[in-house]
């Protein structure tokens, strides 16, 4: 078996994962303040820029499903090299763009390849090493996904104050090159997960069409009303197509995604909480950033969100301590509460004051860091570890759709409801608060109706791949105690 000189070395593989995930995730959160600079230099309208960002997010969502399919039938580590190479190409295209086409193609490639790398690289880091390493991996995942996003406003504000955008994109390209080098050095040839698996063409088409339509429709809200056919049609139609994707996966004899296996108490509660947390937090940050742009310089505004990054770091460290105990479930609940309180704090004045934003963003950072990744582990422990890639794909697909679709919809609400942008923002932030509260209440209700006390995971048994980390009761098991769940995923 061909191997690189650093194959199997956990620090090198973990560094590779960090360098693969951080660039696009941080960039996506940093682009708001510098969008106008990019559009002006490349001769693009703000609407064209908005559609480009939307399609890049669509690429990220679609990549979660595509990565699972390719992992089934193609050598996974070889594909990792392909994804890394495409990420470098996309990053260089955006940094060196001299016309809209170069930037559009490059940025969509960045979104697509980041999710391909996420699904291909993170699960092996979770289950490919002894259980003692799982604590470090849990912390790394939290920091990569949410620490990077939380740092975005600070990075974007600093770059805007420098009146440029290319340095940020060249740094992103450089990090992508380092990730590709590390993927070569840690190369360990592995066979496909299931060479005889059929290609689920229906799932791939539904995911591509649904995500592209949803994000295109959401991006059109910048210049069109919600009821305009160019906005409402793709947005609602795309959501229906995504629903059709999950119906297809539930009814298929050999599904690509383990939808049926996840329909039990613990994973449904965890996934629903993750969706609501992602939607509420991304929208709240976007709303307050937009509201305060008129009042505060970009750099100072970005620094106000630095506590969000600090909150993400703190929760990542604490998560490494609690994820192997029954406190994991309560930790996710506490995270949802912190998120709700953070939104209320940011919404205590119109427009929000600097102090409120700093405190509120810190609470939001704690809330998101303590809810989304724990919810992912709650879902993952409910199936065998061999299915973690598919579980991760489902959670990331739903999280991406919720986060990147709800934010532009609520930004539209902020500009159209009320007497001015400040009153509209207050209304939209209350909607964010409602989303967070609903996620909390539904999660708690699922546990109550499932008749389950939060269990501690059997990590060693789960890592063996022979059984789930715990037994998750069927949905509403309190009212149907004899019913059994289906935990098979062909």
Image (tube, rainbow, N blue to C red):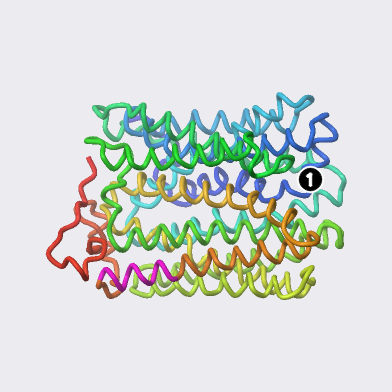
Q: In the depicted view, which residue is nearer to us: 245 or 330?
A: 245
Relative to 425, is 447 above or below? Answer: below
Q: Quadrant of the C terminus?
A: top left
Left or right of residue 193, residue 50 in this image? right
Q: Residue at x 65, y 65 (%)?
A: 429
Q: In the depicted view, which residue is nearer to us: 238 or 389?
A: 238
- Residue 297 highlighted magenta (yes or no): no
Tell me the SS state at disc 1: helix
- Residue 449 highlighted magenta (yes or no): yes
* Rendered location of residue 154, percent (x, y): 74, 57
* Rendered location of residue 5, percent (x, y): 45, 38
Q: Quadrant of the N terminus?
A: top left
Left or right of residue 479, residue 441 in this image? right
Q: Which residue is mark 1?
A: 34
Q: Residue at x 59, y 52 (%)?
A: 406
Work out which residue is located at the far left of the displayed protein and give it: 482
Relative to 416, is 93 above or below? Answer: above
**Which of the 4 quarters of the picture holds residue 220?**
top right
Q: Which residues are magenta?
A: 441-450
**From where the camera sits, is residue 327 visible?**
yes
Q: Residue at x 65, y 46 (%)?
A: 28
Magenta residues, dominant SS class: helix
């Amino acid at each position: 078996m061909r191997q690189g000189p650093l194959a199997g070395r956990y620090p090198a593989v973990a560094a590779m994962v960090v360098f693969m995930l951080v660039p696009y995730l941080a960039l996506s959160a940093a682009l708001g303040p510098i969008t106008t600079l990019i559009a002006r230099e490349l001769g693009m309208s703000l609407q064209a820029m908005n559609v480009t960002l939307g399609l890049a997010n669509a690429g990220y969502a679609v990549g979660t499903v595509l990565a699972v399919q390719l992992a089934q039938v193609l050598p996974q580590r070889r594909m990792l090299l392909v994804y890394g190479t495409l990420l470098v190409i996309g990053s260089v295209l955006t940094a060196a763009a001299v016309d809209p086409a170069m930037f559009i193609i490059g940025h969509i490639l960045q979104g697509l390849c980041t999710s391909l790398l996420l699904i291909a690289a993170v699960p092996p880091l979770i289950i490919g090493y002894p259980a003692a390493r799982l604590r470090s991996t849990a912390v790394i995942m939290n920091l990569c996904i949410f620490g990077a996003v939380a740092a975005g406003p600070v990075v974007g504000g600093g770059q805007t104050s420098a009146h440029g955008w290319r340095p940020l994109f060249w740094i992103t390209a450089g990090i992508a090159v380092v990730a590709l080098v590390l993927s070569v050095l840690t190369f360990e040839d592995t066979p496909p997960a299931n060479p005889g698996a059929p290609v689920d063409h229906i799932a791939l088409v539904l995911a591509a069409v649904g995500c592209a339509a949803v994000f295109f429709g959401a991006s059109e809200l910048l210049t069109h009303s919600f009821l305009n056919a160019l906005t409402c049609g793709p947005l609602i139609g795309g959501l229906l197509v995504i629903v059709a994707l999950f119906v297809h996966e539930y009814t298929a004899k050999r599904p690509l995604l383990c939808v049926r296996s996840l329909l039990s108490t613990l994973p449904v509660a965890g996934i629903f909480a993750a969706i609501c947390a992602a939607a509420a937090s991304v929208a709240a940050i976007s709303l307050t950033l937009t509201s305060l742009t008129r009042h505060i310089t970009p750099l100072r505004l970005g620094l106000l969100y630095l506590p969000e990054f600090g909150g993400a770091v703190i929760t990542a460290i604490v998560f490494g301590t609690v994820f192997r105990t029954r406190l994991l479930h309560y930790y996710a609940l506490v995270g949802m509460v912190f998120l709700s309180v953070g939104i209320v704090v940011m919404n205590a004045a119109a427009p929000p004051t600097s102090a409120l934003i700093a405190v509120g963003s810190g609470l939001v950072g704690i809330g998101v860091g303590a809810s989304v990744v724990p919810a992912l582990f709650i879902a993952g422990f409910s199936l065998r570890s061999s299915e973690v890639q598919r579980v991760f794909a489902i959670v990331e697909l739903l999280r991406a759709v919720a986060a990147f679709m709800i934010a532009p919809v609520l930004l539209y609400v902020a500009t159209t409801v009320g007497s001015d942008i400040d009153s509209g923002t207050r209304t939209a932030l209350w909607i964010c608060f409602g989303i967070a509260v609903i996620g909390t209440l539904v999660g708690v209700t699922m546990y109550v109706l499932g008749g389950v006390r939060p269990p501690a995971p059997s990590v060693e048994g789960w890592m063996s791949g022979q059984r789930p980390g715990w037994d998750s009761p069927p949905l509403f098991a309190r009212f149907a105690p004899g019913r059994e769940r289906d935990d098979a995923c062909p």
